[in-house]
Amino acid sequence: MPVIAQHQTIAIKPITVPTGGRDFELQVKVTAPVQGADLPVIVFSHGNAWSMDGYEPLVDRWAAAGFVVVQPTHLDSRRFGLGFDDPRFATIWRVRIADLHGVLDHLGHVMEQAGLTGRADQSRVALVGHSWGAQTVGALLGARVFDDAGNPGEDFSRDGIKAGVLIAATGTGDSLTPFAVEHLSFMRPDYSTMSTPALVIAGEKDQSKMSTRGPDWFLDAYHLSPAPKWLMAVPEGEHTLGGIAGEGVAETTDPDPARVALVADAVSAYLFDALGVHTDAWSTFRVAAETERRATLQHKD
């Protein structure tokens, strides 16, 4: 695979985002190239229990490729200690969505605090999320959540977002395990309204403990959403796709640095194209990935 990374990077944290309605301050980490201008922006939503300090293998590679990456810490982070039995947990999915809106509302402030005013291109913003973060991102791309009666809920979509990437995104809620039904009732996404262009990335061996279905559960975000969409299925990939949350972390069941690089570079290439930065990046990546049999790709337009 071609190596996209090339720039020296710097990280700045914590930056507090001025937003209310939260039990703890909303803080973010910003990672960016040391040099360069007109830099596109990725706002990244972490998976359950993580924080702005996770996912360095992805974030560092994106920044090295030329992106400014903003990582909020959501309320489900381990550092806040809100477990499944905490009465506040049932509404954290809404707070997560509000977090992303808050970051976007105050993106200029975040860039100023990071010393990136005039270097970050705030007209080229994409959203990326992993696992629970992918469902969170999906809401801003137009997806909704079904209630117990099967009715789609509120519209949390965000104007001005040109593209998104959903990594290991929650599938439909008709096959949730009893634990998921009790503690994670929001895991009933309705992708039929997710109209923003997006890349869906799924591991071909990702077996969720929250669903009775197999790895095909993670393909719903692609199959059930309107075009334009891309799907990248990763052979042998499990839920953390080689270790995207960090090197050697407990959640990684399929350690493979090459798989992590594949996922990171797929996101960079897709977003470079979708944001109009390098319009040949995605086609070049796809040819290499399929030639080397590192991934299977599908498209609907």
Image (cartoon, helix red, strand yellow):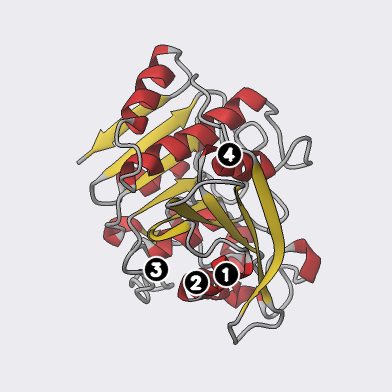
Crowd class of label 2 (few under 14; some 14 to 19; many from 20; radius 10 Å): some
Q: Nearer the viewer, mark 4 or mark 1?
A: 1
Rounded to the nearest angstrom, the CA distance separating label 4 from label 3 is 39 Å
Specify which label sits upstream in the sequence, 4 or 2: 4
> Does residue 287 sit above or below 6 in this rendering?
above
Specify which label sits upstream in the sequence, 3 or 2: 2
Residue 146 is tagged as 3
Q: Amino acid at mark 4?
A: Ala
Q: Nearer the viewer, mark 3 or mark 1?
A: 1
Image x and y of residue 145, in percent: 41, 67
Q: Nearer the viewer, mark 4 or mark 3?
A: 4
Quadrant where the image shows the C terminus: top left
Residue 112 is tagged as 1
Residue 202 relative to residue 221: left or right: right
Q: Amino acid at mark 1?
A: Glu
Nearer to us in this view, 5 or 199: 5
Q: Amino acid at mark 2?
A: Gly
Q: Nearer the viewer, mark 3 or mark 2?
A: 2
